[in-house]
Amino acid sequence: MTELAAELRGAVRGEVGFDVTSRALVTMDASNYRRVPAGVVAPRDADDVAAVLEVCRARGVPVVARGGGTSIAGQATGTGVVLDFTRHMNRLVGLDPATRTAVVQPGLVLDRLQEAAAPHGLRFGPDPSTHGRCTLGGMIGNNSCGAHSVAWGTTADNVRELDVLTARGRRLRPGRDWAGAPEGLRQLVEGDLARLRTGFPDLPRRISGYALDALLPERGADVARSFCGSEGTLGILTEATVRLVEAPPARALAVLGYGEESAAAEAAAGLLPYGPLTVEGMAADLVPSPAGLPRGGAWLFVETGGGTAAEARARAETIVRAADVLDALVVTDAAGQRALWRVREDASGTATRMPDGTEAWPGWEDCAVPPARLGAYLRDFRALLTAHHLRGTPYGHFGDGCIHVRIDFDLLSEAGVARFRRFSEELAEVVVAHGGSLSGEHGDGQARAELLPKMYGAELVTLFERAKGVWDPDDLLNPGMLVRPAPLDTNLRFAVLPREPVPVAFGYPSDGGDFAAAVRRCVGVAKCRTTGPSGASVMCPSFRATGEEAHSTRGRARLLHEMLAGELVTDGWRSTEVRDALDLCLSCKGCRSDCPVGVDMATYKAEFLHHHYAGRRRPAAHYSMGRLPKWLGWAARTRTARLVNALASVPPLAALAKRLGGIAPERRIPRLAAQPFSRWERRRERGRPRERTAYLWPDTFTEHLSPSVGRAAVRVLEAAGVTVLPLPDRRRVRGGGAFPWGTRRERACCGLTYLSTGQLDQARAVLRRTLDLLEPLLPPAAPDPAPGPDPDPDPADKAGYPPPFVVLEPSCAAALRADLPELLPDDPRAARLAARVVTFAEALEGLAPDWTPPRLDRPVTGQTHCHQHAVLGDAADRRLREAAALTGDLAGGCCGLAGNFGFEKGHFEVSRTCAEEQLLPAVREAEPGTVVLADGFSCRTQLEQLAGVRGRHLAEVLAQALDGAGE
């Protein structure tokens, strides 16, 4: 492999990666399969592609083209050289509104094409749910479709011409009338016209096999169309001319409720004569909360278009009247439609877990039958699931007869894999009996290609093999896909994982305590690779800053998978490859909420760092910032805050301190408060006790760096009629025996800085001390609750319970709510404390529901704290802002500082890039008089250091209004 890598480096201008990380990142796509490549090349242009093909052909090394890596059948994995088109060959070459065409490179993400076409009133018709990260090359390779295929067809319906390189280096331009056909293809087709005219089922979503029937003379002998769906096995696409369609100026969305999915499926075909843009279906199993949906156990999402909003609505209402439904909803506003479509789009990830948390997998993700047969097919499909003791929840493109489904296959045991094979063989027969296609969108890959003879018969499959031989006589391109396939039960990605749980520090309660199961959560949906405007989303700031797969949630999960497998990454927890990939993880926890399957990379990072540095010296930043509560507590006890500030203001001393502490030289050291919050709290005058009380948690940042936030929170809470109690502490004698040498004040701490740096032994010790200290304030242990959701989930409003703990710093509140019970799963006090933690806004809403805040009548800008977004939720904050007449929405994303991350040496540029994505532009563009809200100390620090803007906690804004102070 060393010689191959060297030869490729000498032949191409793009990057050549034969290192462990480059290979590990592409061992899998979004399927059940895993194959280890020899290396990865990111070509810069078609000449680079030709050079790779020449080198690999001479050496007999396979070549696999890869786009976004979201394929669900395994066709984006391979054992040879993988071509990554997303890095360089990702441009929109041209767009011609007059001819409604665009010229694209294979690595262009679909959403980028849609953004360019939108100002002209145009769009590319097909739009898979992965539109934010799938590429045009991948869509052409799979003949992708998406929700709007009932109106605008498949990708093949929207391709005009292609630029293709054959395995032997010939440049072709496939099009109609045999344009760009390799030598021998026309003779092959004309020698078997009868079979081609009768051997293909007639249905809109036939994706399986090669589309050789597109080469029939009556169909225009369209070589470009026949190339679509060939999964990179015939040639390498380097450019494509695609057709654009007119986007309706206005749209409406009718959501139709039915009792169950078969009823919805049977109704779908009857709606097609009304000309809808979509007829999508899904069942209640895939909806975490049916809020906002009409009554029913299954729904059709039917979109209509029109020249005006009234016209679009009228068409939607016509469809509602024509449909036999339990209930219906018509939405015309864009925000409401986007919210409903997110429910449907996230189903591809949500479906990877059954309602009880059991894992579910692709493999039979997208079969298609004639739309009129879909209801009957679903009943037979359900019966087959029951016969094999399997479960799955269908959803998808009901108007095209195509369903997606993830099934709870056991792919970890021999018996489970054997059942997977038996079910696959029997389901293929059911699909064929209904006149269907084994694949209706995602291609055959390894998952279904073995079963193509059941659909097409042996003779037509032999014709596919001969066509492959015409295009690629050396079988160089993606071998094992479509023809002469590998068995569907080999190369399973789970086979290499350890069968017994590995010892870990966190409890992983949602994964049965199994770290491997937690890592398996990532199925490759790749929502973390979205590069366009993220709106309220946070995930994944480091990928959005660098564009590197290794810095995406999926990339890191792949490396952790390979670490557990031990084949590529051979040094386990000591792996430098995994460490380096995790280094730019901001621990924002955005993936915990934004990833459809709830990957929590912040927790995985802390786990890894805990093991990686066990018994070894850590980076300096882990000591300087990871143990920040200790150093700040020392400064407070010795009353040396002013001295520390003075020393930090001397540039040479500050530079030395930053160098020794592993702090980025570009950063300014924050000033310590002369008077910690708790000292002020102990000395302040108190009013009379009230019925409603709460403990204010003096987190490290509020205590030592921004006590003004704590004072403001006290002012507001007491104005609302809440008595604020100081959190108790205790003095502990230092030393021991006959020689005690002083005392220290022991305080409650959330352990955040220890958690974020992976110092989990210290975090556990700190949290246990906190539980010991606060145990008298916790509610008594309750008996095991009855199954079902907590009827009163608000911890601030439970009669007879001890007062809640109000935590002002969102990251600390998130650590107490989420990390504490997961790090100490064996201590019942952890869950009891977590249940009593509330944010500032939640405390006001729960303890003073009748209080009216002062009315400010001011616009706001800023950013919702990433931990608030991911763990705590901001609904109470939004209601409080609305009550105070603070108008406008906060930006999404991450500020980029993220606690210690943005202060660590080597992270400054990424930190700044994250801030420049949404936060800083939002602040710069705000009108005069706008309130800049930033509840997190990190967010406020980032604003101050990068924009010279003072952000304020919501408590500070309300307290100032109460005091009637001017600006």
Image (cartoon, rainbow, N blue to C red):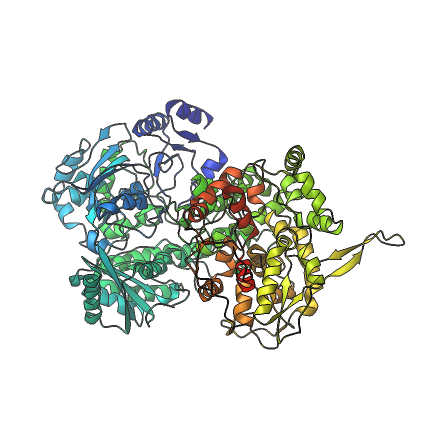
Residue 734 position within the rendered picture, expressed as x and y whole percent measured from the top left: 81, 53
Q: Is residue 259 above or below residue 19?
A: below
In front of the other: 752 or 897: 897
Q: Residue pushed farthest top?
A: 10
Residue 520 at x, y = what percent? 48, 52
Query: Looking at the image, which is closer to me, 453 or 967?
Result: 967
| 616 to the left or right of 464 | right
Q: Answer left or right for 453 relative to 656.
A: left
Which x, y percent locates residue 309?
A: 22, 61
Up/down of 533 relative to 323, above or below? above
Q: Can residue 445 be seen in this view?
A: yes
Residue for point 65% across, 58% down = 698
Q: In which quarter of the image is residue 117?
A: top left
| Residue 499 can be seen in this image | no
Quadrant in which residue 389 is drawn: bottom left
Query: Which one is nearer the viewer's eye here, 143 or 949?
Result: 949
Count the numbered circles shown: 0
The quarter of the picture where residue 369 lies is: bottom left
- For the view shown, which residue lies furthest in the left direction? 218
Of the 4 image quadrants, the one containing the N terminus is top left
Q: Is residue 35 left or right of residue 482?
A: right
Residue 156, given in percent of the width and then of the height, sits at 22, 45
Outermost residue to the right: 738
